[in-house]
Image (cartoon, rainbow, N blue to C red):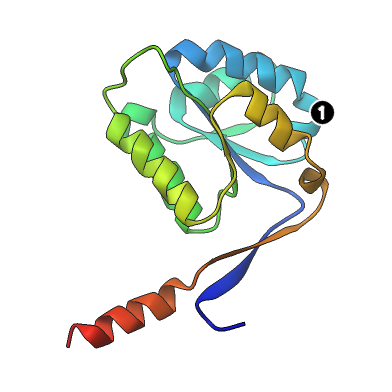
Amino acid sequence: MDNEYITMTIGKQKNIALIAHDGMKQKLIEWCNENKDILKHHFLCGTGTTARMITDKTGLPVRGYNSGPLGGDQQIGAKIVEGKVDFVIFLSDPFTAQPHDPDVKALLRIAAVYDIPIANTKATADFMLHSEFMNKEYEHKIINFDKQVKDRAATLK
């Protein structure tokens, strides 16, 4: 295969980001409790308030970043770019306008760029978590960004 794409591997132990808008936090906590036996085998992180609430109510260790409106969504996006988040559960509230909507859109975009599985509903989260891929490594191809940058730089001389 040409060098337009590179193969990335999502390990057997997943790095899962857990995020929820205020109106969906309780639903995410319930989902985490229902799936505790699976989630405890993976590294969990999340935006500030959500991470704290999940840890407090489920006992699952969740590394917290900033709250979403304070840059937490951006921090999770940066972890995707660094290869340190490879699975996102983001229960968004479809009925409430969010002041940090541009941050959410940026997170969704970066997840798509890096071909990261992302669930925005409980049903999708269930399908992802109970997939055969949860128990093994998963290889996926992403754009070779180094080549793309070199090619672009060459055209801008």
Check the image and report above or below for 42 versus 9.
above
Q: Position of residue 10 (x, y in %)?
A: 67, 56
Residue at image location 76% in from the left, 25% down from the top = 36
Check the image and report above or below for 132 versus 52.
below
* Residue closer to the observer: 28 or 63: 28
Which quadrant is home to the C terminus?
A: bottom left
Q: Position of residue 19 (x, y in %)?
A: 51, 29
* Residue closer to the observer: 63 or 42: 42
Query: Is residue 21 in view from this perspective?
Result: yes
How many callouts does the rendering have? 1
Identify the element where label 1 is drawn.
helix
Residue at image location 53% in from the left, 29% down from the top = 120
- Occupied quadrant, residue 145: bottom left
Q: Position of residue 146 (x, y in %)?
A: 42, 77
Q: Position of residue 47 (x, y in %)?
A: 46, 31
Q: Is residue 75 left or right of residue 14?
A: left
Which quadrant is home to the N terminus?
A: bottom right
Q: Is residue 108 left or right of residue 129?
A: left
Q: Amino acid at mark 1?
A: Asp
Query: Is residue 75 in view from this perspective?
Result: no
Which residue, as the protein is rendered here, is positioned at the far front?
Answer: 1
* Residue closer to the observer: 70 or 1: 1
Residue at image location 59% in from the left, 13% down from the top = 27
Badge 1 crowding class, 10 Å Cα cut-off, few under 14, some 14 to 19, many 20 or more, is few
The residue beneath circle 1 is: 37
Check the image and report above or below for 106 versus 155.
above
- Occupied quadrant, residue 59: top right
Residue at image location 82% in from the left, 47% down from the top = 135
